[in-house]
Image: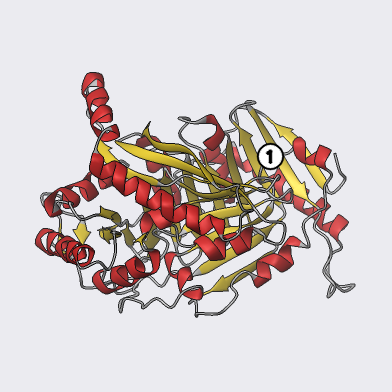
Amino acid sequence: MASSVDILNLVSTLDVLRTLAAFEDQRFVLLFDSAARHRERDARYTILTADPVAVTQLDKAAFGTNPFEKLRMWQKRLPALSEEDCDALPSFYGGIAGLMSYELGQAFEKIPCPAIDDFKIPALLAGLFDWAIVWDHIEGTVRRYALQLQATQSQDLTTPQPATRLRDRIAWIDERLQRSIEHDPTSTQAVVSNSPATAISPLRHRIEPISEIYSDFTRDQYTSTVGRVIEYIRAGDIFQANLSQRLMSPWSGTATELYASVRSNNPAPFCGLLRTDEFSIVSASPERFLKVDRLRQVETRPIKGTRRRPRSPIADLYASDELSTSEKDRAENVMIVDLLRNDISRTCQPGTVRVTGLCEVERFETVLHLVSTVVGKLRDDCDVWDLMVGCFPGGSITGAPKIRAMEIIAELEPILRGAYCGSLFFLGPCGDFDSSILIRTFTLKDGWVHFPVGGGIVADSDPLDEYRETLHKASGMIRSLRTP
């Protein structure tokens, strides 16, 4: 293995949550967690990293700006590894990772913005990381990786040289790992609780009969707003739009406490946690946004079509059959597949974009989903950031045509989405890129947690059914909030 990557085999029984607890007091912590094993290729790794070497933050995105310029510069600092070395390494073991909020899309298109921004989540927050702990669920291994980043041109004699920094980083990680044995994964002693501080939007309507869950819509307001989307569809403005309501609840615990509950109650292949000193993101997303492997193969897996899972196995099969044959849900899914084929075609080689799976039923903890797969191959003159510019935010959470649907969303939803419908992402030194769609996602800040839920509205949508579907999607999340 190249000398720029130091690898240590750890005990295979190392617990994810206890290990997270040993690093959670850091200013920037990221966990990419395949907490559900329903598809091996989507759920092979769990990855923990923290304390980045460098951080970039964009609070608001302005049209025409290049939010990825710093990330491209960081790529040049990642170690250059041989193909043989890359074949023996996981997709991420250090590199570039972070959060893209939904409103980052305003850098690429002129989209209006809702008036209320109470949580003030940055449009982009990313770090350059020189280490990771990786659980490989197929091989059954746990390894610590540390990278020797390349020096910058501005590096002087007072800055630790790469080899020295690598030795110091290894010692720091290994000392922290010793703590994991003694840490309680739900301990609040080493972290700042999500204590009340900031005034939150007054748009709070109690969801009955749940006393501590609120929405920015009443039921009648939401169904009426669904009706307005249908009017836009019938007028020919759009074919589909993804409308959401923001659910909220008081929450005084830590992000790790909530994540432990989410991981137990609502596991998903794209679970994730991002903790900063200002806010935290806890996600149980079932949906991949964009993946690019080291051979530049692109994959996106949009979800459209949902049913609540019955408790009875026989009823579950009937629900699956009903979903797979639903003309409405299949039409909704196919519309987004066509949109994503167009989006990735902007940066993929001609003739390589194709659909390899259409409207396949996949089972998750509380719901059934229709999932499709679209693939392509990135052009030689494009990189993953060009791909993001052409595709972000994801079509499955906007609508079609995409830009007009986003304009209507901004008109009808009263509050910024923030992290919701954005993405957690990483890019490894070998060129592997992966990202989620941040649905089934909590944002924690100042004594509150919000978790929007939505669905695609089409011409024959029933407003009350659409409202009920959002609550079905929220059921596992609400259960996570109630579980200590």
Judged left or right of residue 7, residue 211 is: left
Given residues 431 and 240, the one toward you in this image is 240
Looking at the picture, does residue 15 appear above or below residue 347? above
Q: Quadrant of the N terminus?
A: top right
Q: Quadrant of the C terminus?
A: top left
Q: Secondary structure at mark 1?
A: loop
Q: Quadrant of residue 18?
A: top right
State the image coordinates of residue 164 (x, y, percent, origin top left).
86, 57
The structure residue drawn at horizontal position 47% and vertical position 36%, both measured from the top left corner, is: 35
Q: Is residue 189 visible?
A: no
State the image coordinates of residue 474 (x, y, percent, origin top left).
27, 47
State the image coordinates of residue 314 (x, y, percent, origin top left).
23, 19
Judged left or right of residue 208, residue 159 is: right
Q: Quadrant of residue 311?
A: top left
State the image coordinates of residue 465 (x, y, percent, origin top left).
15, 48
Label 1, on which residue? 90
Q: How is the image coloured?
A: secondary structure
Amino acid under disc 1? Pro
Binning the other alpha carbons within 10 Å of mark 1 as few (below 14), some (14 to 19) or many (20 upward) gives: some
Judged left or right of residue 233, residue 141 is: right
Q: Is residue 347 visible?
A: yes
| Extreme residue toward the top, this view | 314
| Extreme residue toward the front, this view | 351
The structure residue drawn at horizontal position 51% and vertical position 55%, both measured from the top left corner, is: 424
Given residues 152 and 226, the one toward you in this image is 226
Looking at the picture, does residue 325 appear above or below residue 65? above
The structure residue drawn at horizontal position 70% and vertical position 44%, both measured from the top left corner, is: 295
The structure residue drawn at horizontal position 52% and vertical position 42%, both measured from the top left corner, is: 33
